[in-house]
Image (spheres, grey):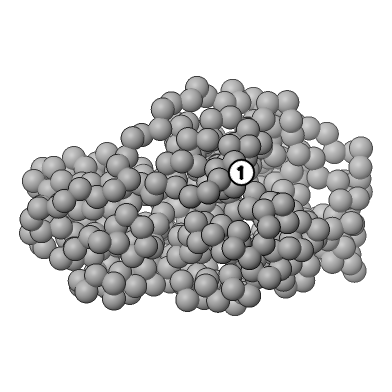
């Protein structure tokens, strides 16, 4: 695991304090892929798991820097929320992607699957792209520019299914986010913004990441400007938008024995609407077996999930003074149900999971807990409700609303 990828809250806060003075230079330096990546924050994983909140970063930024100076940085912080809000209103994009990933492994020609394996293993024959694949496998991290180049190479040069490329990233990126990962790949493919694709160009790599080319330019002719052409996607670009689920943003008075369920969509319960909860027990789900067999996550990715989950439990125990357990059952629904039953709970409280793996179990979990006479209460952070409500169309209409919101006195 890369030592520069902060995961725990302590490391996240330390990394953020060190980067805060660099925000002023972010707009001019962010596109360059530097060795060590010191020009970017490397906060993606802790933001994804919320060991550090976007709200904290935004508040610190605006206290330290004028809005015009920090705007590009603030946009980058808000991109993840934009993607999440967009997917919350179109959940079938996630479910259909997962189905196509599974189906592809059984229906694609053997030579296509073999080529996908070679390219994702860093054996494509295009040296700079192979360096990117190897960096991802070895460190669990890629600069955003490198992510776009490699995704474009996979889709438009190798002409491989975008779904399998997105799955490769999802299995290895320590900050893999269901919304950001899935929708960014769709954007590169030309699905997210119909008619617009992202094409990798060797001149762009020469300008922003010469280290990927240094010493070995084998295969670079496949990326020459004007050589790469867009591969037309076959599926419908965007489904109809559904209303956001109306989750409460504050906790009503709880009665009886209450348990807190912590999950990796939000591991900071001690700050925000759950801070005053008085749980008698805290539980988080973690199953190495499920992560390996269902999602086929890399060992690094599983280790990062373990680290952030344990950090969240440790902080929650310290904050609430309640015992915490890790539920390791193969079926998370049955495992969490067994915990609720053992603790004699009448209610389980949690942050509302986002569209993705955790959300996928919610319907079954609610039914199972109901059978045990246990109520499941899901809470959403007020700032998420606001940001998600702005994500009805493209990013720039979102940012117009979001920037006005951030600039307004609160």
Q: Residue at x 76, y 56 (%)?
A: 27
Whether residue 73 can be seen here: yes
Q: Nearer the viewer, residue 111 or 260?
A: 260
Question: Picture coordinates of residue 89 (x, y %)?
Answer: 46, 32
Q: How many marks?
A: 1
Q: Is residue 272 above or below residue 239?
A: below
Local crowd size for mark 1, using a 10 Å CA cut-off: few (<14), some (14–19), many (≥20): some
The structure residue drawn at horizontal position 71% and vertical position 68%, both measured from the top left corner, is 22
Residue 114 appears in the rendering:
no
Q: Quadrant of residue 188?
A: top right
Helix, strand or loop for disc 1? helix
Vertical relation: 93 (above or below) 379: above
Instruction: Report which quarter residue 328 is drawn in.
Output: bottom left
Q: Which residue is mark 1?
A: 403
> Residue 44, percent across and down?
57, 60
Above or below for 331 versus 396: below
Question: Residue 111 versus residue 319: which sits nearer the camera?
Answer: 319
Instruction: Measuring from the top left, give residue 72's x and y in whole percent.
Output: 70, 52
Seen at 22% across and 56% down, the residue is: 336
Query: In the picture provided, is 314 more to the left or to the right than 243?
Result: left
Instruction: Report the side of 139 relative to 252 (left or right).
Output: right
């Amino acid at each position: 695991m890369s030592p520069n990828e902060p995961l725990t809250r302590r490391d996240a806060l330390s990394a953020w304090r060190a980067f805060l003075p660099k925000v002023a230079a972010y707009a001019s330096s962010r596109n360059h892929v530097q060795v060590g990546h010191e020009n970017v924050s490397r906060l993606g994983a802790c933001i994804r798991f919320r060991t550090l909140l976007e709200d904290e970063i935004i508040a610190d930024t605006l206290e330290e820097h004028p809005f015009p100076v920090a705007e590009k940085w603030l946009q980058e912080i808000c991109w993840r929320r934009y993607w999440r809000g967009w997917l919350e209103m179109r959940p079938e994009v996630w479910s259909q992607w997962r189905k196509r990933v599974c189906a592809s492994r059984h229906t694609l020609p053997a030579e296509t699957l073999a080529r996908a394996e070679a390219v994702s293993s860093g054996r494509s024959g295009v040296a700079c792209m192979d360096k990117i694949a190897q960096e991802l496998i070895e460190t669990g991290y890629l600069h955003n520019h490198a992510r776009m180049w490699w995704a474009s190479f996979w889709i438009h040069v190798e002409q491989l299914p975008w779904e399998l490329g997105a799955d490769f990233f999802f299995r290895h990126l320590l900050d893999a986010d269901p919304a950001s990962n899935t929708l960014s790949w769709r954007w590169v493919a030309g699905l997210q913004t119909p008619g617009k694709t992202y094409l990798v160009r060797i001149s762009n790599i020469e300008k922003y990441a010469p280290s990927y080319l240094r010493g070995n330019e084998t295969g670079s002719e496949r990326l020459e400007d004007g050589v790469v052409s867009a591969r037309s996607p076959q599926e419908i670009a965007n489904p109809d938008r559904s209303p956001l689920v109306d989750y409460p943003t504050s906790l009503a008075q709880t009665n009886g024995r209450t348990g807190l369920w912590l999950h990796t969509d939000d591991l900071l319960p001690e700050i925000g609407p759950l801070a005053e909860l008085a749980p008698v027990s805290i539980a988080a789900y973690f199953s190495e077996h499920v992560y390996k067999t269902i999602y086929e996550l890399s060992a690094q990715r599983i280790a990062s999930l373990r680290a952030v989950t344990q950090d969240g439990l440790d902080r929650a125990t310290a904050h609430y003074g309640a015992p915490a357990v890790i539920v390791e059952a193969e079926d998370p629904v049955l495992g969490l149900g067994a915990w609720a039953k053992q603790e004699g709970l009448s209610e389980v409280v949690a942050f509302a999971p986002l569209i993705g793996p955790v959300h996928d179990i919610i319907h079954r979990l609610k039914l199972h807990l109901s059978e045990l006479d246990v109520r499941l209460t899901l809470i959403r952070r007020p700032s998420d409700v606001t940001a998600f409500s702005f994500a009805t169309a493209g990013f720039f209409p979102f940012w117009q609303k979001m920037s006005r919101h951030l600039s307004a006195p609160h």
